[in-house]
Image (cartoon, grey):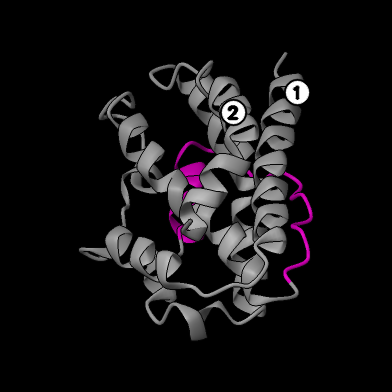
Amino acid sequence: MSLRSVLRAQTADCHAEVDKLFGTFDLSNRQQYRTFLRAHARIVPAAEDALEDAGIASMLPDWPERRRTQLLLADIRELGDSLPQPLLPPALPCEAALWGALYVLEGSKLGGALLAKSVPDHLPSSYLSLQGPKGAMRSFMDRLDASDLDDPAAAISAARSIFDLFLKAGQLELEAVP
């Protein structure tokens, strides 16, 4: 079984929870869209930095073009908001953990592309619209499938941790809405 299949099966429950929570946001509403972006800003920049610090560029040479932090921050600033307090990302001590974390972040781009259609033209949507270089998702999936890990436990743990952080970030931002 490929690592992608293992990750999909072993994270289906927490992935569904995140989808359910973030599916409650009305992205055509400026305030709810702002809250949605703030939730992402609590985890995406820190997770991308953690991946970079752990050496993801050696596994994925086009990593710099895949990062979305600057687009997310620009969208938040264009909405006239400041950045929320970030959540601490999980430790990524090995290649398997990097693959697990990246599985969630790269996969969120697919969801983002679907959600971008709900954002009105007058609101900034560069974060949700970016898919990366042409063929980037296919390239990532091919590399993920070709990864030769003896034990996927660290990948599963890292992926579940990132999903859990997205869930926590969404809940924190929703609780802060008056």
Contact between marks 1 and 2 (CB within 8 A): the answer is: yes
Question: In the figure, residue 155 lies in which quadrant?
Answer: bottom right
Q: Specify the amino acid type for callout 2.
A: Thr
User: Residue at position x 47%, y 54% from top?
Assistant: 4
Question: In the figure, residue 84 lies in which quadrant?
Answer: top right
Residue 60 located left or right of residue 174:
left
Would residue 85 be counted in the magenta stretch?
yes
- Residue 34 lies, in percent from the top left, at 53, 30
Residue 58 located left or right of residue 133:
right
What residue range appears in magenta?
A: 68-92
Task: List the residue tagged with mark 1.
Answer: 176
| Picture mark count | 2
- Residue 144 lies, in percent from the top left, at 44, 65
Q: Main secondary structure of the magenta part?
A: loop
User: Residue at position x 66%, y 78% from top?
Assistant: 54
Instruction: Using the image, determine if residue 152 lies above or below residue 148.
Output: above
Q: Nearer the viewer, residue 140 or 121?
A: 140
Task: List the residue tagged with mark 2.
Answer: 35
Mark 2 or mark 1, which is nearer the start of the sequence?
A: 2
Residue that protrudes farthest toward the left in the picture = 134
Q: Secondary structure at mark 1?
A: helix
Residue that protrudes farthest toward the front in the picture = 1
Mark 1 to mark 2 CA distance (whole Å): 9 Å
Q: Nearer the viewer, residue 110 or 24?
A: 110
**Image quarter hosting the C terminus:** top right
User: Residue at position x 54%, y 37% from top?
Assistant: 37
Q: Is residue 81 visible?
A: no
- Residue 31 lies, in percent from the top left, at 53, 21
Q: Residues within 10 Å of mark 2 (few under 14, many from 20)?
A: many
Q: Specify the amino acid type for callout 1.
A: Ala
